[in-house]
Amino acid sequence: MLFPIIYSEDFLLHDTGKGHPERPERLRAIVDGLRSSVWAEYLDWQVPTSVEGRPPLLWIERIHTREHIALVRGLASSGGGFLDGDTIVSPHSYDAALLAVNAWLDGVDRVLERENPAFVLARPPGHHALSDRGMGFCLFSNAAIAAHYALEQPGVERVAILDWDVHHGNGTEAIVENHPQIIYCSLHQYPCYPGTGRMRRRKWQENILNIPLTPGSAMDEYWPEFETEAIPFVRDFQPDLLIVSAGYDANQNDRLAGMNLHPEDYGKFTEACLQVTSRILFGLEGGYDLESLSQSAIATVAACLRETAGV
C-alpha cells in the first residue's frame, strides 16, 4: 500500500524573504530527501484539492475571525506586509495558505478513507495562529481547522491533536481548549517562544495536556514523558483520528531552540503513535535545519510504512 504525501509546489510561493527561517527550501529539502530515499517507490504524491474545487474559507471562517482573514488577504493583494516582526505575508501567501488548509483537509479524507496514515507537506505552518491573528510564522490554524473538519465526517466523534514541535502550539490550544470532542497534547521546550505552555494540566480543562521540557532535553528526557504521559492521554481518549503537528525543530542541529533530539527519535515517536491508532494525519509545522528536517520527516514516513505496509 502506497503512503500518501500531499504536496504542491505552490507552497513554495509563500515568500518570507531572504534569511527567514521558514523558507521554501524547507519543503524542497523534505521532498528531495523522500524522493531519493529507499522509500521513494512506496510514496503516493498527491496534489491538494484546488481552492475552486473546495472553498477552504468555509472551514477557515469557523476558526478565524473575518477581520483576520481580511487582513491576510488585504496584505497579500497589496504586495505583502507583516502580521508581526516574524510573520510575513507575501503577494502569494494568502493563496498558499488557503491551499495549505485544503491539503490538511485532504489529509483527513485520505486517512479516513484508507484507515492508514498520510503526511501533509504544506506551508505556511499553523499551530501558533490564533483565531484573530497570525503569529510565529503561522497564518491560519491548519491542525485546528482539520480537527473541526474531521468532526463533520461520518463516524468521527473524537479527535486528538499531538504537537511535538519544539514550540508550544498556543494557537491550536486556544482554539480547541473548550471543545469536548478534541484533546490537545504538546511536548515543547519551556521557556521558549511563545512563552505559553508552562502549566502541565488545568483542572478546568481536562482536554489539554502540556508537557514542558527544559532546554537541552534529549531523548532520555523526552521518551519517559512521551511514553507515560502523552501516549496514555491520547490512547485513553480513544480518538477516531489523531492529528500530529509534526514540527522537527527539537533536533540538536536546529538553532531556533535548544533541544537535543535526533531524526531517528521521531521514528520512535511515530511508532508509539501507531500503537494507538493507524488513523494518523501528520502535518508539517516547524523544523529549520534542512538536513535534520529532511531526515526526521523520512524517519516518520519510514515508521509508518514499516508498521502499516510491512515494508
Image (cartoon, rainbow, N blue to C red):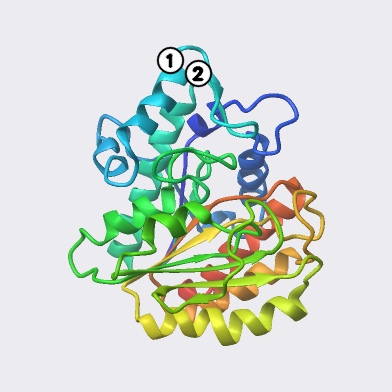
Q: Which residue is mark 2?
A: 91
Front residue of 149/43: it is 149
Determine which quarter of the picture holds residue 62: top left
The image position of residue 239, as x and y in percent, is: 34, 75
Q: Front-most of 22 and 105?
A: 22
Under mark 1, the amino acid is Ser
Give the vertical position of 158 relative to 252 (above or below). below
The percent coordinates of residue 188 (x first, y second) are: 64, 64
Does 61 sit left or right of 175 as displayed?
left
**How far across and down, in percent of the image, does residue 156 sit?**
24, 68
Instruction: Residue at 67% x, 80% y: name it.
Output: 223
197 or 288: which is nearer to us?
Answer: 197
Q: Residues within 10 Å of mark 1 (few under 14, many from 20)?
A: some
Question: Tag 2, which secondary structure?
Answer: loop
Quarter of the rendering occupied by the N terminus: bottom left
Residue found 28% across the figure and 40% down from its top: 61
Residue at the left extreme, as displayed: 154
Identify the mark at residue 125; answer none if there is no mark: none
* Residue ID for mark 1: 77
Work out whether residue 284 or residue 19 is closer to the camera in this orientation and state it: 19
Is 287 placed left or right of 130 in the picture?
A: right
User: Which label's residue is closer to the chain start, 2 or 1?
Assistant: 1
Residue count near mark 2 (Cα–Cα under 10 Å), binned few <14, some 14–19, many ≥20? many
Q: Residue at x 39, y 75 (%)?
A: 204
